[in-house]
Image (cartoon, coloured by chain):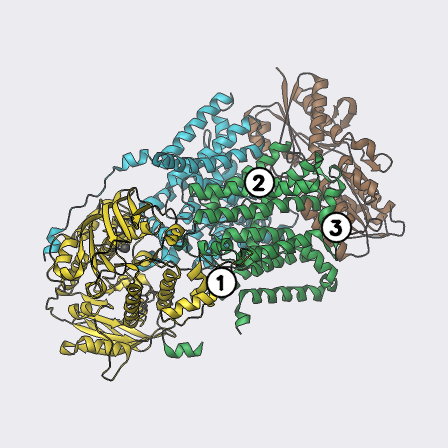
Chain colours: A green, B brown, C yellow, D cyan
Amino acid sequence: MNLLKSREAILALAILGLLALIASRFPGFVAPANLAAVFTDSSPLILLALGQMAVILTKCIDLSVAANLALCGMVAALMNGAGIPLPLILIAVIALGAALGAFNGMLVWTLGIPSIVVTLGTMTIYRGVIFLLTGGAWINAHQMSPAFKAFPRTVIAGLPVMAWIAIAIIAAVALLMMRTPLGRAFYAVGGNPHAAVYTGISVGRTQFAAFVLAGALAGLTGYLWVARYAVAYVDIAGGFELDVVAACVIGGIAIAGGAGTVAGCVMGALFLGIIKNALPVVGISPFWQMAISGAAILIAIAFNAQSQRAPGRIILKRAEHRT
Amino acid sequence: EDMRIAIVAKALGIGFFEAAHKGAEEAAEELGDVEIIYTGPTDTTAEGQIEVINSLIAQRVDAIAVSANDTDALVPTLKKAMQRGITVISWDSGVAPEGRQMHLNPSSAPLIGNMIIKLAADHMPEGGQVAVLSATTTSTNQNVWIEEMNKVAGDYPDVEVVGTVYGDDLADKSYRETQGLLKTYPDLKAIIAPTSVGIVAAAQAVTDAGKIGEVNVTGLGLPSEMAGHVSSGASKSFAIWNPIDLGYSATMIAYHLAKGEATAEPGATIPMGRMGEVTLDDNTEAAMADPFVYDASNVEEFAEVF
Amino acid sequence: MQAQTSPVLSLRGIVKTFPGVRALDGVQMDLYPGQVTALVGENGAGKSTIVKILTGIYQPDEGKIEVDGVETRFPTAQAAGQAGVTAIHQETVLFDELSVAENIFIGHAPRNRFGLIDRRAMRTRAREILRGIGADLNPGVKLRDLGIASKHLVAIARALSIDARVVIMDEPTAALSHKEIAELYELVEKLKAQGKAILFISHKFDEIFRIADRWTVFRDGQFVGEGLMAETNEADLVRMMVGRSVDQIYPKRPARIGKPALTVAGYCHPTEFDEISFTLHEGEILGFYGLVGAGRSEVMQSLFGITQPSKGACRMGGDVRVIRSTSQAVDAGIVYVPEDRGRQGTVKGLPIFQNVTLPSLDRTSRAGFLRMAEEFALAREYTRRLDLRAASLDQDVGLLSGGNQQKVVIAKWLATKPRVIILDEPTKGIDIGSKATVHDFMSELAAEGLAVIMVSSEIPEVLGMSDRVIVMREGRIAAEFEGDAMTPENLVRAAVGITGSENGAAA
Amino acid sequence: MTTIQTGRHIPDRLTSPFSRALKSWEALLLIVAVAIFVLNSLASPYFLDPWNLSDATFNFTEKAMIAFAMAILIIAGDIDLSVGAIIALASTMMGVAMTLGAPTPVLVLLGLGTGLACGAFNGLLVARLGLPAIVVTIGTMSLFRGISYIVLGDGAFTGYPASFAWFGQGYVFWVITVEMVIFALAALGFGILLHRTNFGRMAYAIGNNATAARFSGIRVGRVRFILFLLTGLMSGVAAICLTSRLGSTRPSIAFGFELEVVTIVVLGGVAILGGSGSITGVVLAALVMGLVTFGLGLLNVPGIVMSIVVGALLIAVIALPRLWAMLRRG
Ligand SMILES: Nc1ncnc2c1ncn2[C@@H]1O[C@H](COP(=O)(O)OP(=O)(O)OP(=O)(O)O)[C@@H](O)[C@H]1O
Ligand SMILES: Nc1ncnc2c1ncn2[C@@H]1O[C@H](COP(=O)(O)OP(=O)(O)OP(=O)(O)O)[C@@H](O)[C@H]1O
Ligand SMILES: [Mg+2]
Ligand SMILES: [Mg+2]
């Protein structure tokens, strides 16, 4: 009974239902190899959603993650072009992503500018910087070294490295959220910023940390994205920030901050990933895709609101017994 | 004073248009008294292109040569340009006749339509299924080519065109749509991608799915971007016209029209320097040249050029 | 009583300014081990500000803090905790989405050797602390699932989780019921016995005289005086606080009770209340007494159209109807002064005059268009009647002290010329001077023929002001008293549900 | 009773509205706008030409129309990210009617009606069902544009009647376009609505504290619903103008409009979290945006560089006063 009420359980059921529905039209979709591929395809969304989750938990929002991803991806491709070895590139993009996140975080923390305004600005700035770096030129597959492109695709124990990275990050973020003071501070700051001050938690500093985390993950994803799709240009992942926010919302991360779980977030990303992947496969006209994902988002929001509705105070004894 | 000719791309940063820009500069040098303004919106939207064209009108350029993001939406703005005495032509991706003086097709649509299906058919002697990966649902030229392709599909009875998907000229979406195709049609023999973004993404997806040799990716692409995929075998051959020539020709035509040395009316001939001359049809359209096929034998050589 | 030990903590010349306000202006204070110091002062005197300075939330602009005679600074809340200062703050400082144990330990959670939070140790210690204050709560449950009183116990447990030498309590009893207040007193005694210095802030004089050893008075951010409790009396303290003497605290005037103004018949709600029926007359003050959480506010809010009853109706004059929205209530002449001023009462961010005219916009405007002059006129009239203290009517209402905000809320409703006014805990957290103003006003309104409902958890207030008292318990009307039957004993007995002779300590 | 007589005198205002206006956000924006105007006329010989300036207004008029309604919506604490999608749907509906032979007045009514219906749908989900606006409108953004894709697929509607072209291409007087007039009327109308009516006051109250507003007898749900309706309606108006200007409809029309509209609103000094802002600020912000993009366009600066400038301007204009205040406080 209680299990059924939890948001995560409802979402898990929804995903299973979705898979069953797709399988009834296209059995090949639920073959383990294909499911693994779907997971791999959803990995960028999962990674970004985990970072966004931290930001949303602290009552902020980061609209610049996709631009951050694109910039870091481009820098990764440029570094590869300059012959820099892959491990250095990885460290560099994560650091760059974190720095871009830190820039957002600094503006939010020190100047108290609302995060939506800051990241609305930086999303265009970060993309613009890519243009300035390259003059708008693309970097194509043939301009990338084989090692650079191969890393995310290398299959280890049946799954590509990209999927393993996603799994590792999910585990790390779960540990961070549940077991470290910083993770709990995300919840505290979003749940009751006023009270957080009284407990010695700096609201601004915690929000800053969330932006740095989201930025670092976006940076890492930037490399993975560019290596996987073997192309880098100004507009990669354009509009992806809204998918990321939608994944968090579907996963039950309260947009007002302070509530949500890593499991929910990952399932929200998977749900959206499955829809986006499955629609072309099951032969639904491409023109229907957008409306269907829109409707799915709305239904998910309505569901979450239903299960999140506060039970209210119960004063009457008889009512207490009934529930 | 120099004549100012604006070359308007669908969006800045796309290799194809950068190459066309090169050609335009070449023409300008040859003509001597021409200044090229190469510009375009950030992303492939009609609204963005209109803003760009408005600022070109304001600068009173002498001619605008545009590759349109939308056949119809640019018409009112371009009409205004013509009213203010600016020569307007479209090239590559056309504008409806009332919005331009003439349109320069890179090649003729029937030729391209036939070429792309022929490229696929050539490498599947037993016949089989092919699918199309297009750009956006609103891209004028892709739609025309696919239409022409379907018209001649009867000439290739063994080839079954199973469907069209849209990658929106985004690498990741094209990649995912290709994955979808490979899953939906396990027996697929070829993918036709008449777009330079789509063909690269499709080749990459086929490579990643380990289907090199089973699925041939073909269509229209740039040699520099496709060289790797041709050598890996993901693509046996593809076609394209030379974008440098296209930019060159568009500039030449715009120049002659703006100078009043030629008029844009059905049946008229307009010179275009080293590319010879074109004759306008009843829609005041003209085709520059035949598409040219690239395969393992020549792709490396052209990869250096564009 | 060990009168002359040296203080654990001393403040000297503390100044703190906010934009536009000098909240503290060179105040001083000393806290002694094993003694309770009561800090009293009007609303806005700067009491909570000094607490925040002592706990590292604000930094003083000037002045020094000495611990054991050594000058110290508290740059963060953690620093204050490490120096042994802990506080139960006036506002709740808890997190609904975190567990009880995490709420107690957030900011100073025990860690294991990997630096991760040691959840088992945290739970064990949380359980110990809770047991120490007589609260049998499961440390694992989310705070969201607890009632208001339990939440307060968690707040207290949090303060005690720091091994402190100085414990500060800023109006800790404001939301507690009798039984819990009694337990809190015991706790204070225990802490005293352990030699801790306690700073106790309250507006309730009975409380102060019962547990404090020393007193300190602030007025308008300035230090007025300090001394031993044993050597003072209530009247002196009040005079120092307010700067004048307040003689008549409950100025109940005999009113002429008129026709029924509001008749409520059989209001029910699925979870909050059941079978609520009563009649309210013009010129009458009807008191609603009950323990905190008895459901009085819920009933009042359903009369005001915030929630809808599942059954029942009310009658005003001729019409029988159910109020379905607050705008209907205002149209019908029922208005409600909520107990949660900050959230439900004032619109912070809007200036005072706009707060006052908010429900009267129809009257100050023409055809839906604003007329500022009319608004200022209306606001001027009613804020003056309530003796509001403010720099200008154009000032943000959020900059006012709690008591003055309450006056703005009352002014806002009086400006609508209501027939029935419901005041929910109208003097909660209000200083004695402002309290008198509010009480004065209530009698005056009744005398003008208005029907008044006053919800209060303070027995002296209920008895002093009401013509009639309804007592609620667990969502139902438990009893109704009038005239001589209105005694503290009767009220408490009905409120806790005791029929025998044993009763709780009535205040 | 003594208390009544002893009420202290409280002045109405400490600072005059005039001196306050001097120090306001709007004053800052005005300075920025004038500075950009001067810079532009120095940088390009083509700038100070009435016809060119008239053309330049198309860079912002449609977005600004929506921005006025959006400003009040944001002041009341909500947001609507689906406005671009509403334009697409409204334009598609007009296109459908046009192919069925509907005359211009019907097209206009249909555009407005679709806008209202979309606004009502958003309003229903947000104001009635209590779902968070930002995520609801992210959802409806996909839904509305998605419907447009279902209807149009890869096609386009063209061939709108000649009389329909008036809205986006017509001139009222000399260089004054129809869109400019609509823009000015909308600015005036929404300015009055926000600053001079009870409704506007309620929007401020709700944005600052919706609970207290409800406890003050304000029909909060209704006000929020109406604001979504108005935003939908203005999106419908913008759809008419844009469709008329483009002379055609595709599902990708007005893609990405929402963020530009929000940018104008925020640049105009409206607090994104609700509670404060003015229409004057939004008008000035629209002018600033239009001047910046047109000025850079005349210099043939690539669009993406313009968006860097706009992004930086957004942050700078909001950050500078705060930095200044911080520095002054030490
Ligand atoms: N953060 C702040 N910003 C501006 N002014 C403030 C702030 N905090 C307090 N004030 C002002 O400082 C003064 C002292 O407030 P404080 O909260 O200390 O009073 P108090 O004595 O605790 O009153 P109460 O009995 O109502 O709790 C008041 O005038 C108040 O309005
Ligand atoms: N369990 C709870 N969780 C959250 N808020 C609560 C809870 N219990 C009470 N509150 C809030 O705390 C405040 C004080 O509530 P209170 O205990 O006075 O309840 P009430 O129903 O108003 O009862 P009464 O008025 O009879 O005391 C109210 O604003 C109420 O909404
Ligand atoms: Mg206080
Ligand atoms: Mg109550």
Q: Nearer the viewer, residue D120 or C229?
A: C229
Say what amino acid the circle numbered 3 marks: Thr
Please name the amino acid that badge 1 sits on.
Answer: Ala
Q: Residue furthest top?
A: B1
Residue B2 in the image: above or below residue C325: above
Q: Quadrant of residue B197?
A: top right
B147 vs A102, nearest the viewer: A102
Q: How many marks?
A: 3
Q: From the viewer's perspective, is the residue at label 2 or at label 3 nearer? A: 3
The residue identified by callout 2 is: D247
In the image, taking residue C64 as reference, residue C41 lies left or right, namely left
Q: B28 above or below D10?
A: above
- The Cα–Cα distance between marks 1 and 3, rounded to whole angstroms, is 41 Å
Query: Quarter of the picture for ligand 4?
Result: bottom left
Return the residue at label 3. A154
Estimate the x, y position of residue B137 in percent, counting from the top left: 67, 46
Residue A305: assigned label:
1
Residue farthest bottom in this picture? C500
- Most foreground residue, B280 or C353: C353
* Sequence order check, earlier mark of 1 and 3: 3
Residue type at tag 2 = Gly
Q: Left or right: D104 with respect to B173?
A: left
Residue C320 visible here: yes
Q: Chain of mark 1?
A: A
Please tell me whether mark 1 or mark 3 is closer to you in this view.
3
Q: Residue furthest right?
A: B125
Say whether marks 1 and 2 touch (CB < 8 Å): no
